[in-house]
């Protein structure tokens, strides 16, 4: 049994969902989403027993390309995140009605297939193919089923597509250059390359352009807020919960081990870029009047801190970044889903038009408050573990980095609690807010349970990812 089985399940699921027709599409998609999540857990058990669940096979002879899937603790953690959130996102959409629903659910599973492949690929060209494949489904999801004026939506989505595609081309050029020197795209062969400092700096920059746009980091973030707002909520969840993690994961897996000398030379600059994103995202979030846009800029602030932790080149920085990636995935999906629940009832995302919901739905209010507190890293929640570890790693480099990075907690608490006050509290709203349905409640309960469980007991994830991160750090420090 190997990890290719997950890809097969998701790909077959995409075709089966489309063939099932509009009436059964959501249920078939959920079945295959759960099957992929279940398969991920089974493969994790095999991995923990010491079995080799990686897969490699010759694919193309010239150039030499292998269909190589690497299953270590880091990649398995990201696959578990992807498959779990895919199932949750599909479940969360049961309250929506989509035209041509078979197509949108098939695209969700196909996008999950491509993102899972990105996390598993250990051949550079295969990785690049999966990376680009993930862009196609979200383009159509946002363009066809998105919100607002069609022309504005088209502009936002096309800008996103061009930005990410252009950035990825720089990464492809870097891979081709390294292939010419190594004669292989396999990651272990690329790690062995003895590149000069100048070569590493060019390759580092090429990878950074691709990842900074995908994550996004300032000043490459200009596509984000509009696409998050214009995309249907399930598209926004896929982008914020999983897709941006592709960039953050790739920093650790590809960029930093391939260019360790450049990474050390540029360390302070890119930690500064990440922290600047924290402050910028938080300040802009304070001024937002649209709920989805506020959450989009909040996400920008959080991923800036994750990137800053990654560029510390320390075990604590890597570990904190991965923990925060997973925590952020669950909490941001929960928050966007809460915004969607409100939109289903009030048909508006304008914060000024909301309020008074707590009197009509105390259960939903309580769950929304828990998600808000998790977002601002309240102790006992998963986000606290990740943020604390990242801030600790920043303090090892320079205490001022930790102080400035810590503003995400202070500013985040201010704008998130202020948002909660305007959206949920105040006098009873004249519009009727129907209580949450069973599927809505189940989705929120699952997310909250994950946030509390790993907030109190993060050891399983720590134990899973630490050996992989230590191996990557050994590769980075090979020049010392």
Image (tube, rainbow, N blue to C red):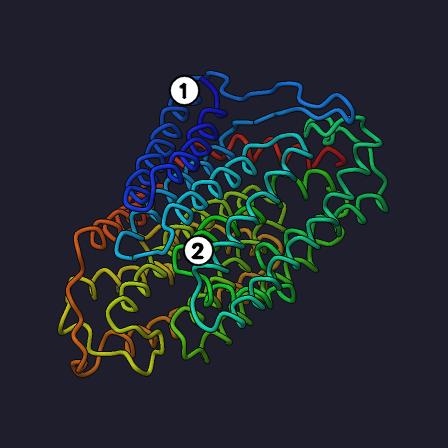
Q: Is residue 134 left or right of residue 438?
A: right
Provide the secondary structure element on which disc 2 rests: helix
The dot on residue 10 is none
Image-based side of 179 in relation to 161, left or right: right
Q: Residue at x 36, y 78 (%)?
A: 350
Q: Which residue is mark 1?
A: 46
Q: Is residue 408 visible?
A: no
Q: Is residue 456 left or right of residue 257?
A: left
For the C terminus, the quadrant is top right
| Residue 149 placement (x, y as % from top left) | 47, 73
For image coordinates 23% across by 55% down, the residue present is: 440
Label 2 and label 1: CA atoms lie apart by: 32 Å
Q: Quadrant of the N terminus?
A: top left
Which is in the foreground here, disc 2 or disc 1?
2
Q: Please say if 165 is above or below 433.
A: above
In this rendering, the answer to whether 358 lies above or below 308 is below
In the depicted view, which residue is nearer to us: 418 or 123? 123
Q: Residue 385: x percent and y percent?
A: 40, 50
Residue positioned 53% across, 39% down in the render: 114
Density class for disc 2 (Cα within 10 Å; few <14, some 14-19, many ≥20) is many
Q: What is the x, y in percent for residue 247?
A: 58, 49
Q: Secondary structure at mark 1?
A: helix
> Closer to the N terminus: mark 2 or mark 1?
1
Q: Using the rendered view, name the quadrant where residue 222 is placed.
A: bottom right
Q: Position of residue 266 (x, y in %)?
A: 73, 54
- Residue nearest the observer in this picture, 345 or 324: 345
In the picture of the structure, the residue carrying the numbered disc 2 is 235
Q: How many marks?
A: 2
Q: Residues within 10 Å of mark 1 (few under 14, many from 20)?
A: some
Q: Residue drawn at (51%, 34%), measured in percent from left and top?
A: 75
């Amino acid at each position: 049994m190997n990890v290719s089985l997950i890809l097969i399940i998701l790909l077959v699921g995409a075709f089966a969902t489309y063939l099932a027709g509009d009436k059964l599409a959501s249920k078939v998609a959920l079945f295959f989403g759960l099957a992929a999540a279940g398969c991920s857990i089974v493969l994790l058990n095999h991995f923990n027993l010491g079995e080799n669940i990686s897969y490699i096979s010759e694919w193309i002879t010239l150039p030499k390309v292998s269909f190589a899937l690497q299953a270590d603790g880091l990649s398995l953690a990201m696959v578990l995140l992807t498959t779990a959130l895919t199932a949750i996102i599909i479940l969360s959409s049961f309250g929506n009605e989509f035209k041509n629903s078979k197509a949108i659910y098939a695209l969700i599973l196909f996008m999950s297939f491509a993102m899972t492949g990105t996390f598993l690929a250990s051949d550079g060209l295969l990785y690049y193919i999966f990376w680009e494949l993930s862009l196609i489904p979200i383009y159509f999801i946002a363009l066809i089923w998105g919100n607002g004026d069609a022309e504005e939506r088209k502009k936002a989505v096309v800008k996103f597509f061009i930005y990410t595609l252009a950035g990825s081309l720089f990464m492809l050029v870097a891979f081709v250059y390294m292939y010419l020197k190594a004669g292989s795209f396999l990651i272990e062969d690329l790690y062995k390359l003895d590149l000069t400092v100048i070569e590493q700096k060019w390759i580092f920059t090429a990878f950074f352009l691709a990842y900074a746009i995908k994550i996004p980091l300032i000043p490459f973030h200009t596509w984000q807020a509009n696409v998050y707002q214009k995309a249907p909520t399930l598209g926004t969840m896929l982008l914020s919960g999983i897709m941006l993690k592709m960039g953050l994961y790739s920093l650790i897996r590809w960029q930093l081990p391939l260019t360790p000398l450049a990474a050390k030379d540029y360390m302070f600059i890119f930690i500064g870029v990440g922290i600047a994103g924290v402050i910028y995202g938080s300040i802009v979030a304070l001024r937002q009047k649209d709920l989805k846009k506020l959450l989009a800029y909040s996400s920008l602030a959080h991923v800036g801190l994750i990137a800053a932790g990654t560029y510390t080149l320390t075990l604590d920085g890597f570990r904190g970044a991965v923990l925060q990636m997973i925590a952020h995935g669950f909490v941001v999906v929960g928050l966007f889903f809460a915004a969607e629940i409100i939109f289903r009832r009030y048909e508006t995302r304008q914060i000024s038009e909301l309020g008074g919901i707590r009197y009509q739905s105390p259960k939903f209010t309580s769950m929304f408050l828990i998600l808000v507190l998790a977002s601002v890293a309240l102790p006992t929640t998963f986000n606290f573990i990740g943020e604390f570890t990242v801030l600790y790693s920043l303090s090892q480099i320079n205490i001022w980095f930790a102080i400035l990075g810590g503003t995400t907690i202070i500013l985040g608490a201010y704008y998130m609690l202020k948002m909660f006050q305007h959206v949920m509290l105040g006098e009873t709203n004249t519009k009727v807010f129907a209580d949450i349905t069973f599927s809505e409640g189940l989705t929120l309960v699952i997310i909250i349970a994950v946030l509390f469980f790993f907030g109190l007991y993060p050891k399983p994830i720590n134990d899973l990812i630490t050996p992989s991160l230590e191996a990557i750090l050994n590769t980075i420090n090979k020049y010392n």
